Image (cartoon, rainbow, N blue to C red):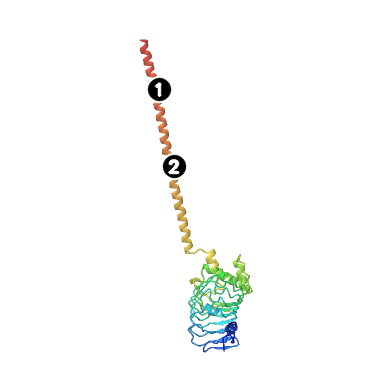
Amino acid sequence: MSLASGPGPRLLLFSLGMGLVSGSKCPKNCVCQDQEVSCTDMQLTEYPPDIPLNTRRLFLNNNRIASLPALELGFLSDLVYLDCQNNRIREVMEYTFIGVFKLIYLDLSSNNLTSIAPLSFSVLSNLVRLNISNNPHLLYLDKYVFANITSLIYLDLRNTGLQTISHDAFQHLVVLKTVYLSGNPWNCNCSFLSFTMYLLLSQLDHPAIRRQVQVMKIATSSRLIWSTLKIPDDQDAICEEPMELAGWPITRVGNPLQYMCITHLDQQDYIFLLLIGFCIFAAGTVAAWLTGVCAVLYQNAHRKSSGDDMEDEYGIRVTHQIFRSNTQFNQGRSLI
C-alpha cells in the first residue's frame, strides 16, 4: 500500500491528539476507572507517569513521593480531587498547582513539608477543603499563602510546627467555616495578638466571646467580611509560650495578651524608658554646658573689646594734654 493510499498525515495527528486527550493509558499497578486513578500503597517514589489527562480524582496517598512535578500535574486540567497524604513531599512551589484550576479538595497531610511558597494556592480559586496537618517541620506560613482561595471552607493546620501566624493570612478566607489549630507550639507573644483578635471576632455567636470583645473594645479598620468560624479543637489549641500564658487556649488569650502588650509595662519597657530618660538628661546637660561655654566666650570677647576702647580713649587724652602743654610752653618763650 502506497503512502498516498493510506490515512493522511492530518488524520494521524488528529488520532494521536485524541488518544492523548482521552488518556487511555493508566500508570503501572494503579487502578483507573471512571475518571478516577488510585495509586494508593504502591511504594511509589516519584509521581507516576501516564496518568489519563481526563482524570478528575487522583489518589497518591501512602507512598514515598518526594515532590509534585508542576508540568505533569498541570496537564490534569479537569482534576478536582487530589489526595497526597502520607508521602515525603518537602515543599510546595508557587507554580506547583498552576494548571489544576478546578481543584476542590487537596490533602497534603502527613508529609515532610518545610515550606510553602507565597501564592502557592493562589490559582486554586475553587478550592473548598485544604489539609496540611501533621507536617511537624512546617514552621512558618507567609501571609500570602492563602491568597485568592476565597472558596475555602475547611482548613486543617493541626500538628505542624507553627508557632505564630498573622491574621493577614486569613484575610481572603471570607467563607471559612472550620479550622483546626491544635498540636502546634503556639507562641502567644504580642505579634500573635492580631490573630487572637481575628479568632474572637470570627466567633461572635458565642456569648462568652461576645462579652470578651466588648471588654476589649476591639477597634479594627480591616475590610474583612467576618463569618462565624468553628474551631472544634479550640480547647486543645493552647499557648506554649510565654510561661505566664502557657496552657491558655489561643481563642481565650485575647484579654491577658492585650494587657501584656498594650496596657502593661514589662522589664524591657522599663529599661527602654530608663535609657530614654538618660539620653534626655545627657542631651540637656551637654546643651547647658555648651550654652555656658558660649556665654563665657561672649563675655570675654566683650570685656576685651571694652578694654581696647578705654585704652584708645586714654591715649587720645594724654596726647591732647601734651599738645596743650607744648603750645603753652611755646607761647611763653615767644613773650620772653
- Look at the image and tell me in which quarter the C terminus lies: top left
Q: Residue at x 42, y 36 (%)?
A: 303
Disc 1: CA contacts within 10 A as few (<14), some (14-19) or many (>=20): few
Q: Residue at x 39, y 23 (%)?
A: 319
N-terminal of the pair, mark 2 or mark 1, is: 2
**Hey, which quadrant is residue 230 in on the image?**
bottom right
The mark found on residue 295 in the picture is: 2
| x then y, percent, for residue 275 | 45, 58
As drawn, is 317 to the left or to the right of 19?
Answer: left
Which residue bears the numbered disc 1? 320
Instruction: Give the label, 2 or 1, closer to the camera.
Output: 1
Q: Which mark is residue 244?
A: none
Residue type at mark 1: give it.
His
> What count of labels does the image hold?
2
Between the C-alphas of marks 2 and 1, the distance is 38 Å
- Residue 276, horizontal then vertical, whole percent: 47, 57
- Disc 2 is placed on an element classified as helix
For disc 2, the neighbor class at 10 Å (few under 14, some 14 to 19, many from 20) is few
| Residue drawn at (42%, 31%) of the image | 309
Q: Nearer the viewer, residue 299 or 143?
A: 143
Tell me the SS state at disc 1. Answer: helix
Which residue corresponds to the image point at 40% horizontal and 32% vertical from the top-left? 308
Amino acid type of the residue that numbered disc 2 sits on in the rendered structure: Ala
Q: Quadrant of the N terminus?
A: bottom right
